Every structure is written in structure tokens, then in C-alpha cells.
Image (cartoon, grey):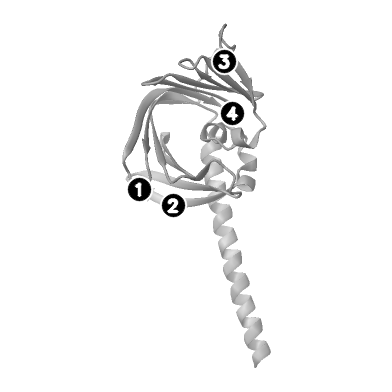
Amino acid sequence: MKLHFRITLWALVLGMLSSAFSVAAEDLNRLQQRLEGMKTLQGDFTQILFDDDGTVLEESQGEFALERPGKFYWHTQEPFEQLLVSDQQFLWLYDPDLEQVTQRSYDQEQVRGTPAAILSDDVDGLGENFSVQYKGADNGRQLFSLRPRVDKDLFQELLLAFTDEGLTEIRVRDNLGQLTIFTLVDVRRNEPVDQRLFEFEPPEGVDVLVD
């Protein structure tokens, strides 16, 4: 009787695990299909940073362009200019106010873990680095949660919101509990992107730091 009970219990547990893995694989596949259908993306963005109590710390806006694999251009224009550019070989962070440029290899984990890199990178490795969960529909948007599989990443959770037209919002909860909301506007999907956006040459006279 005990043996039969144990076999039944293990069968139940294995069935639950199998079901959970099946759901996780389905959620991952659903997100991969969304991202694979987004070869290029460009438009404008607004960005709002909240502290862990929900108080607004900073608001900014700018323009962006993404192209798979590994190319992105993220230009914050107001209130403080900053430029983030990747050509899939290097990531450049340019701060005109500080007259400083930081150069990093694209293969560094701290680069590959940024939202822009995740959206523009090859989607095949997504499940290896992140736990993906479909959160359902909210006001006509399909929500997907990505949580890093290792604790050393830059954020706790990345939330992507899609409509039938494509990606409309990105929410990032960092390891300090702060929340950043990126709202994408005037978005153009799968249109040719000016490749000069992904080319960066440090301006004369600025300090270049190699990280």
C-alpha cells in the first residue's frame, strides 16, 4: 500500500513538473516569436525613473533604433544628453557633459544584460539567460516577464508590453528596487535603419575609458 502511494505521489509530482516546464517553454516560444518578428525597431521614447517608494526621480526623452543582431542606438536628448551605441562588437557610452566616452566589449555580461541588447540580440539564447513568463493581457497589451537566471545581472525583472503593432513599453526593476518605465512612441517596425547610427567615433578632446 505504501509503495503504491509513493509511486502515485511521484507520478503526480512529475506530472506537475512536466506541466510547469511545458508552460515555461510555451511562454518562451511565444516571446521569441514576438521578437523574431521585430527585425528592426526605431522611434522615440520617454523614460521615467521611480524610487522604491514610487517617487519620480527623473524624467527624460530621446530617440532609439534597434537592429538584430546586436546593433542599437539609444540617444537621450533631454534633460541631460547621453548616447549609447552598439555595433555588435563594442558598446560606446558617450556623456557630452562629462566629455567622456566609455568603451566596452559587446560580449561582456553587463552589456548583454541591458534591455537594448536583449531586444536586439539573437533570441535563441533567451531561455538560457532568463526565466520567461507570459503575464497575460492588460488593456489590450500582452505582457512578458523576464527574470535573470543569475543574481549578478543589472535588474530583477524586465517587463515587455506588446500590442498588435509591436513593442510599446519596457519596465525595468533594478536591484535597488527602482523602477524605470520606457514608453515607445512613433515606433516604426521592420523599416530600413540608417547604418550610420550604429557607427561611433569618439569626438576629439574627450576622455576614452576602456572597461
| Horizontal side, residue 136 vs residue 202: left or right | left
Q: Amino acid at mark 2?
A: Lys
202 vs 138: above or below: above
Mark 1 → mark 2, Cα distance in angstroms? 9 Å
Q: Check disc 1: other Cα within 10 Å, few if <14, some if 14-19, many if 20+.
A: few
Front-most of 166 and 91? 91
- Tag 3 secondary structure: helix
Measured in 3D between alpha carbons, the distance from the residue under mark 4 to the one under mark 1, in whole angstroms, is 27 Å
Q: Residues within 10 Å of mark 2 (few under 14, many from 20)?
A: some
Residue 138 disc label: 1
Helix, strand or loop at disc 2? strand
In what element is the residue under mark 1?
strand
Residue 1 sits in which quadrant? bottom right
Instruction: Identify which residue, 61 or 206, lies in the foreground.
Output: 206
- Disc 3: which residue: 195
Marks 1,2: beta carbons within 8 A: yes
